[in-house]
Amino acid sequence: MGWENQEMQQAEEYLQYQIQNGVCGKVMTDEQVEELRKQIVAYSSISEQLAELHKSMSSHHDFTGIRLGNLYYDPISASVGHKITARQRWTPTALQLQILENIYEQGTGTPSKQKIKEIASELVQHGQISETNVYNWFQNRRARSKRKPLASTGSGNGETGACSECVGAKDKRTKPVSSDFAGNVGNVVESFYFQNSDSGINQLMGKVESSRGFDSYSNLVEQFGLLG
Amino acid sequence: MGWENQEMQQAEEYLQYQIQNGVCGKVMTDEQVEELRKQIVAYSSISEQLAELHKSMSSHHDFTGIRLGNLYYDPISASVGHKITARQRWTPTALQLQILENIYEQGTGTPSKQKIKEIASELVQHGQISETNVYNWFQNRRARSKRKPLASTGSGNGETGACSECVGAKDKRTKPVSSDFAGNVGNVVESFYFQNSDSGINQLMGKVESSRGFDSYSNLVEQFGLLG
DNA sequence: GCCGTATGAATGAACG
DNA sequence: CGTTCATTCATACGGC
């Protein structure tokens, strides 16, 4: 159409000006918006099933107490102390678990003080954890994977191959995921997020798109049947 | 600065033109973009993990499932949920129960490997059972009789007063999630952002929803009509 | 039909 | 290191 270069340039400058003054920020093409829309729809649907969890969490959090820095408020005793009252045994986060499993399988499955320190310091990025936790985890992991896979008796009704401490057991726990994944997801996510955001929408889109592991939400949706 | 009305108008027109031609569409503030970015990053990391997990699991043809924080991934249905799949849990038959109780009372209550084997092989005649089941039964029996001042198991089925986990007076069983949430509060407080997207899966939802992020997100959706 | 209890199982930590 | 304990999870079951 009849847009002169000069006009366009002026417009661009104007835009720049507006942006700099916070009047308006990023500009997206409809295509991009649509892309985003799809992403969000898919993701939010996927996360939908977690909503229930959140609900119960928030509806009962008046009994959970809260941690304030190094202090901990216990709603039951209505007091604030330095320790998290009683209980509170460590539970690995999913990511931590995966990483641990990975290390366990790849690594000799051997601990070693130094190594534990390293592992702990790495895992602490994904949630609270101590060296003791790591130590215990390996200890338990080793011990439990050792018990022989004992055939469950009979069948029919209650298949019991599962084992607790049991008498026998094969590794039936978490399978390690691709090392690539286990080792990097955390970082990926972090860098993903903490990256300078000035790059704008294009970058965002690029990242979301190129985010590996899933080709498209439809694929995802199909795989997990997460969309009602 | 020196922006003349005319120039501004031209710019606006230019923008309109661009929009109409699909060159550019919606305009968002940086804040909004950032909000969006957060949402997508959160969702995408969840999805990514699920996808990877799925891939890994299916490639291993493993049917055990995996724990994801408070959630469980079921490789069979390829979905994530709160349950540990349909695996039936063992239930002792009346006869088995009686025998077990008997053994428990007579013996010190401590089984131990060899004994368990024997017991199991004996009980299997009265219904399906595995050593693991026996082991667990004793384990639980011991643990639970400790919390409750229940002395006699009573001969019949009469049983005495009821008390589930007993000492857990607060009975968190009904609100299982909350306790776990408590354990995570710290993380939520400390790392508000998605430094870890892992089991943070619940954390994440908590963050997403509790932060103004979600609202902003909803607003965004409305404002920009991102959701058809 | 929802709510609370009973109980098999999973698992972090501790014990000897 | 192998075992055991303590706590928690998930679900089946029974009453209102």
Image (cartoon, coloured by chain):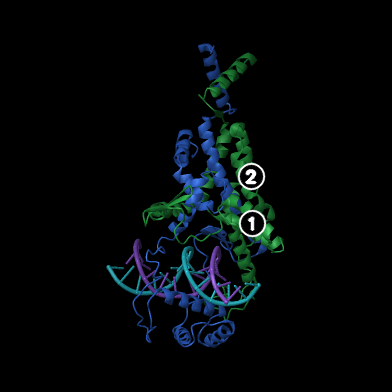
Chain colours: A green, B blue, C purple, D cyan
Query: Residue placed at 55% from the left, 45% from the top?
Result: B194
User: Is disc 1 surrounded by few (<14), some (14 to 19) or many (20+) residues within 10 Å?
Assistant: many
Which residue bears the numbered disc 1? Answer: A99
Q: In the rendering, at what x and y percent does residue A196 appear?
A: 61, 35
Q: Residue A144 sits in which quadrant?
A: bottom right
Looking at the image, can residue A41 be seen? yes
Q: Along the polypeptide, which appears first: circle 1 or circle 2?
A: 1
Q: Chain of mark 1?
A: A
Q: Amino acid at mark 2?
A: Ser
Q: Amino acid at mark 1?
A: Ile
- Please tell me whether mark 2 sits on a helix, a strand or a loop: loop
Answer above or below: position of C8 versus B225: below
Q: In the rendering, at what x and y percent does residue B9 appear?
A: 52, 15
Out of A66 and B67, give the one closest to the viewer.
A66
Give left or right: position of B94 versus A183: left
Give the foreground label among 1 and 2: 1
- Please tell me whether mark 1 sits on a helix, a strand or a loop: helix
Q: In the rendering, at what x and y percent does residue B76 appear?
A: 58, 63
Looking at the image, can residue A167 be seen? no
Which residue bears the numbered disc 2? Answer: A211
